Image (tube, coloured by chain):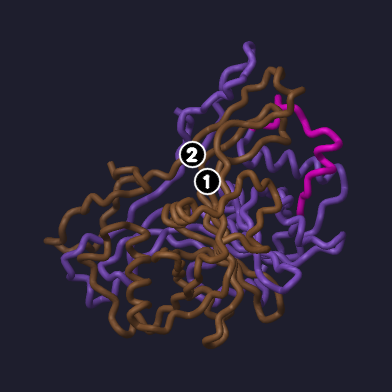
Chain colours: A brown, B purple
Amino acid sequence: MKTDRTTLRRLPERGSHDPDTVEGILDEALICHLGLVDAEGRPFVIPTIHARIGDVLYLHGSPASRALRAGSGVDACVVATIVDGLVLARSAFHHSMNYRSVVVYGRAEKVEDAGEKGAALEAIVEHVLAGRSAGTRAPNEKEVKGTLVLRLTLAEASAKVRAGGPLDDEEDMGLPVWAGHVPLRMVAGDPVPAADLVAGAPPWPDYELGRGEKSP
Amino acid sequence: MKTDRTTLRRLPERGSHDPDTVEGILDEALICHLGLVDAEGRPFVIPTIHARIGDVLYLHGSPASRALRAGSGVDACVVATIVDGLVLARSAFHHSMNYRSVVVYGRAEKVEDAGEKGAALEAIVEHVLAGRSAGTRAPNEKEVKGTLVLRLTLAEASAKVRAGGPLDDEEDMGLPVWAGHVPLRMVAGDPVPAADLVAGAPPWPDYELGRGEKSP
C-alpha cells in the first residue's frame, strides 16, 4: 500500500508496491533486519529470521524483547535485502549493487494466541528450509511460551529492485574501462552431520537449498 | 568498547568486543543496514554500502538524507550481517543459523571535509571490489558534493558469531532425525560486460570476488 512513509522519494523508478514482488523478496530472503526505537529514543537494529503467512510477517523476536512493552506493540521497520550482484561502472561515482529489498513499516505486536504462535514458529522453520518441520520434534508448551514472536502486517510495505548493468554518464561511455556487472548468489556447501548423530538417524534428506540451488 | 548499550544481554557467549573480529566482519560484509529515527520518533532502516578506514565506518548515506538535520549528526545504529549457514536441530525449537554480525551504535555525522570525503568514497568502491578504483574515472567536484557520506566511530561496536552444529536438548539426542549444519556462501557468476562497452576496453580484470571466491 502506498502511504506517506512508503512513498519512494529516492530513485522511485526502482520502487514497487506490487504484492507479488514484495512477498517474493520476503520469502526468498533468509534473514531480515528489524529496526526499533529504545526507551531513550535512539534507534537499534537487530538481524532476525522471519516468515510470511499471507499478508502478515512474523519475526523471531527474542532479541527485541527489551524494547517491547507489554501488549501494546511498538513502531517497527523491517528490511529484507538480497544482494544480487556488483555493478561496475566506468566512473567510480556510478558503481552500485544489484539488489532486491523490501521495507515494511508498522506496529510490531507480540503474538499471544497459542495457535497463531505455533503456526508462526512452524512457518519460520519452513522459511529457513521448506519441508524441514515434518520429522523434527515439535515445540512443547514451554518452548512456545518462552519464544517471543512478533507480527506485523504488510499494509505499509514496498520493494526496491536494481538489476542489470551500469548507468554511466554519456561523456564517460568511451573510456577504456571494463564495465558491466557481476552476478552474486548464495550457494550451499556439503551438509555437515552433527558429530553426535545417532546410528540409525536417517541420511541427509536432500532438501532444496539456497533458494533454487540443490545441495551437491 | 563495552558500554551499556553494547553489553550483550542475550546469548553473551556469542559476543565479542575484539576489534579484529569487529573489523573483519565489517570488511567482509558487502552491505549493512542503517537504523535511524524519523521526525515522528519512529524507526526506519535502510540498506546501504559502507567501508571502514581504521576505526571509522563510512556509509553511503544518500538514502538517509531526509533524516539528517544540518550538521549536528543523528543517533544511528548500523548492523552488518553475514549468513554462514543453516543449523538443523532435532527439535524445531533449536533450529538456527550460523552468522557473523556487527552492531555499531553512535552519532552519524555528515562528512564535510573534501579530503576525508574523497578518501571515504574511494574506500567504499574498494570495499565493493578491491583494486577497482584505479582505472575508473575519479569522482569530480560535483559528484563529491552531491554525495552524502556519513561517518560513525567504532567506539561502540560489538560482534556476535554463531558457528557449528545444533545444540539440542539432552532428551532429544536419540531422535531419528538428521541434524547438522549446512554451510552457505556467496559466489560470483561470470562477469557480464555492459552491452555498450567500447571496442578497445580492456577485458575483465579478474578481480578477487566474493570474499575469497575467484571469478570462474
Given the image, what chain letter belongs to the residue carrying mark 1? A
Residue A148, by quadrant, is bottom left
Instruction: Provide the secondary structure element on which disc 1 rests.
Output: strand
Given the image, what chain letter belongs to the residue carrying mark 2? A
- Residue A184's mark? 2
Is residue B181 in view from this perspective? Answer: yes
Question: Is A144 on the left or on the right of A89, as rendered?
Answer: left
Question: Is A10 on the left or on the right of B180, as rendered?
Answer: right
Please identify the residue farthest to the left as the structure is shown: A200
Residue B207, by quadrant, is top right
Q: Nearer the viewer, residue A118 or A62?
A: A118
Q: Position of residue B148 (x, y in %)?
A: 78, 49
Relative vertical location of residue B62 with respect to residue A133 in this rendering, above or below:
above
Q: Residues within 10 Å of mark 1 (few under 14, many from 20)?
A: some
**Magenta residues, start to end:** B131-150
Q: Quadrant of the N terminus of chain A?
A: bottom right
Q: Residue at x 52, y 79 (%)?
A: A65
Q: Nearer the viewer, residue A27 or A202?
A: A27
Residue named by callout 1: A83
Q: Does the CB distance between marks 2 and 1 fall below 8 Å?
A: yes
Q: Position of residue B5 (x, y in %)?
A: 65, 74
Relative vertical location of residue B145 with respect to residue B45 in this rendering, above or below:
above
Q: Amino acid at mark 2?
A: Leu
Between the residue at mark 2 and the residue at mark 1, the CA separation in whole angstroms equals 7 Å
Q: Tell me, yes or no, whether the highlighted magenta stretch contains residue B133.
A: yes
Q: Nearer the viewer, residue B170 or A96?
A: A96
Residue B159, by quadrant, is bottom right
Q: Position of residue B186 (x, y in %)?
A: 46, 43
